[in-house]
Image: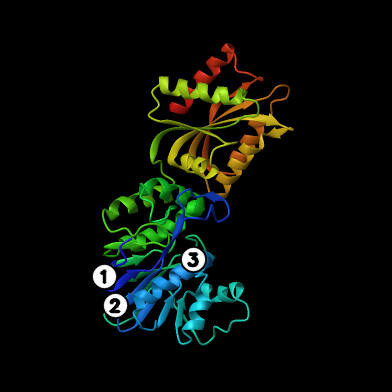
Amino acid sequence: MNKNITTDIKYIGVDDTTLDLFESQYIIPNGISYNSYLITDEKVAIMDTVDLRKSDDWWENLEEALAGRTPDYLIVQHMEPDHAGNIVAALEKYPNIKIVASAKAIQMLPQFFENVDFSNNTITVKENDTLCLGKHTLQFMMAPMVHWPEVMVTYDHTDKVVFSADAFGKFGALSHDEDWACEARRYYFNICGKYGTPVQTLLKKITALDVKCICPLHGPVLTENLGYYIGLYDTWSKYDVETEGVFIAYASIHGGTANVAKKMVEILKEKGAPKVSIADLSRDDMSEAVEDAFRMGKIILAAASYDGDVFPPMHDFLHHLILKGYQRRRIGIIENGSWAPCAGRVMTSLIEKMKEIELVQPMVTIRSRMKQSDIPALESLADAILA
C-alpha cells in the first residue's frame, strides 16, 4: 500500500492477517485491513483509529507520518471497535486532541470506554458542517445505518477525497492482491445488506460531489474507474440483479437432497440458464451463500425435512437472508422427506417474511431418493424459474 494518497493525505492503516473470523462469524482467508489516514495541514487530523489487535503497528505508522507534529483532531466516523479501538489511547497521548464525531457517536463513547471524561475533548458535527485545517476543508455528511446509526462520512474539498467509513469496504488484507468485486460483494451483503435505503441516500450525497478518490475503512483506496465501484454499490443497494442466473442452495442429510440439487444444475444448464451456482449449506461458507443469493435473481432451495421442521442449515440460511433484508427475487422449492415431508411448508413460512418474493410453482416433493418419476417435476420447476 502506497502511504501517500495525496501530498497531504497519508495511509496509516494496518493489515490483520491472523484474524480468522471477522465480526466472529465471517471467514476471512486473506485477512482484513483496518484503514486509518492522516491529513497534514496547518492543523493535523487523524481519520479513525484501528482495532486494538494492531495497536502497535498503527502507532508506529502514525508517529512516522506525524514526523514530530502533534495531531489536533481525531475524526471518528464509526464507533465499531475495529476502527475506534484506540480513541482513548490517542486521547491519553495527546490530551488536547479534539474528537470530531456525530452526536450519536459521542453519545456512544462512554459505552465503550468506562470512566473516561470526554467532555472537554469533543466536537459534535451535523450534516454539512465543515472543519478547516488550513488549505483543506472537511465536510461531514451523516450516513446513519451504513451500517450503524452513528456513522458519518467526510469529504475533503481540496483533494476531492471521500472518507467513506465502512461503505466501499471489502474483506482481505491489502498485502493480498485480489479482485475487488468478489470480496467487496460478500462484505456488502453480509455487513450492509439490510440497509439498502440508507446506502442509496449516501450514494446520492457522494455522486453529487466531485470525487477523485474513495478511502474506506476496509480494503484498498479506490482511485480509478470510480463509476464501476459506485455502479456496483447502486445495484447492490437497490437489490437489483447483478448476474442473470440461478443459485441452488441445498441442505442434505444423507445425500439424497444433494443428488436432487446437482440434477437441477444439469437440467438448468440444459435449458440454457446463463449461469448456475450451487452451495452445500452444511459445508460451504454461509456468507458466500448469502452473497450468491443476493447476486442472482433466481434461487432454488432444496432441503430435507427434519424433526417436523427443515434441516437446520437451511433454516440458518433463510434466517440470514431475513436478517439481511433479502427481497425482490424469485424462489423455487424442493423438499425431501421419507415419511412426512414438511421442509417446504417451513421454508415457505420463512420466505413469507421477506419482501417482494415470488414463490415459483410447482414445489417439488422428493420421497427419500430421487427417482426417474421425479424428473418431470424438476423439469417443470426449471422451466418456471427460468420463465
Q: Quadrant of residue 138?
A: bottom left
Contact between labelled residues 2 and 3, with CB atoms less than 8 Å apart: no
Nearest the eye: 151 or 13: 13
Render colour scheme: rainbow
Residue underneath mark 2? 136
Q: Quadrant of residue 218?
A: bottom left
Which disc number belongs to residue 159? Answer: 1
Q: Position of residue 61 (x, y in %)?
A: 39, 71
Residue at figure coordinates x 46%, y 84% from the top left? 94
Which disc number belongs to residue 54? Answer: 3
**Crowd around label 1: few <14 · some 14–19 · many ≥20 (10 Å):** some
Quadrant in the picture for the N terminus: bottom left
From the image, state whether disc 3 or disc 2 is nearer to you: 3
Disc 2 is placed on an element classified as loop
Disc 1 is placed on an element classified as loop
Residue at figure coordinates x 44%, y 69% from the top left? 58
Three-letter code, disc 2: His
- Disc 1 or 3, which lies upstream in sequence? 3
- Disc 3 or 2, which lies upstream in sequence? 3
Three-letter code, disc 3: Lys
Disc 3 is placed on an element classified as helix
